[in-house]
Amino acid sequence: MAISFRLMTEGDIPLYKEWAAKEHVRTVWFCEGYQPVDAIYGKVAGNGYDYPYLILLDRRPIGHIVTCDLFAYKSLCPKAKGVFTDEPEGTFSIDLFIGEEDLLNKGYGTEAVRRFSDLLFRERGARRVVIDPDINHSQALRCYEKAGFKPIGKQHDGVMEVLILEKRREVLRPKVSVFIAASLDGYIAQEDGSVEFLNAIEAGDED
């Protein structure tokens, strides 16, 4: 089964809110001190630095992943982005969750993180991708480490202590013809070398 991504539209927000109300998402993403659920409207409308996507499993929406261009954020906003205060050009953060309970702990979060971070290197010119999960969230930490992220330090983000992990461009796995991957502009490379276009504007959690 193939993991791919599609840029969110306004029509996806009801599904996002349905996921956000589930306990395994709400207690991690929307605890007091973090962005409210309705912050998704500004991200979908476009703010110049956040890019929200659906995670698709064989085109079925199963979760959410968002990347933030931290250099663009620094240029446009006076307030620091959590623990990321002065990131150089080419640094992107990611956050994600798997919204469907029946697909938790099956490796889809790890695969989504791996593929999406690799796509940021290829499609958006990222040099470094960072993520900052709760330091006590052992499942998330395993997910990100299996996806190639390395811990570089811990910090308090104003709500909880987080572990900062990074993945740098030089450790990107070589792209091979048999690798099935969705590109950020909506194409899926097939095993036979052909390319299929997703009918969309553009093509998290734990395991």
Image (cartoon, rainbow, N blue to C red):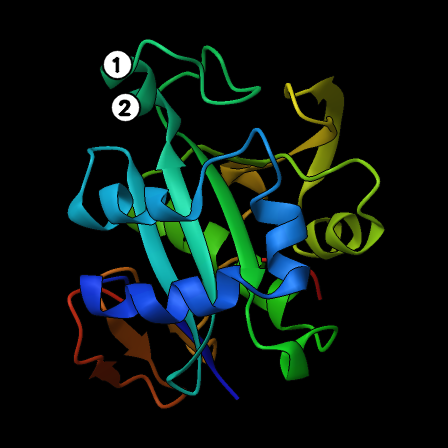
State the image quarter where residue 189 is shown. bottom left
Residue indicated by mark 1: 75
Quadrant for the C terminus, please. Answer: bottom right
Task: Look at 79% across and 53% down and name the residue there.
Answer: 142
* Residue 34 screen position, x and y as percent: 53, 33
Location of mark 2 (residue)? 72
Left-right relation of 201 to 158? left
List x then y, in percent, for residue 91: 43, 28
Q: Residues within 10 Å of mark 2 (few under 14, many from 20)?
A: some
Could you tell me residue 2's position as x and y percent? 48, 83
Can see residue 205? no
Amino acid on which disc 2 is placed: Ala
Q: Amino acid at mark 1?
A: Ser
**157 or 185: which is nearer to us?**
157
Residue 197 on image: x %, y %: 19, 80
Q: Are dots 2 and 1 in contact, CB under 8 Å?
A: yes
Name the residue rendered at 26%, 14% in the picture. 75
Report the Cα–Cα distance between label 2 and label 1: 5 Å
Drawn side of residue 35 relative to residue 100, left or right:
left
Residue 24 vertical placement versus 85 (above, below): below
* Quarter where residue 71 is shown: top left
| Residue depicted at x 61% and y 72% | 108
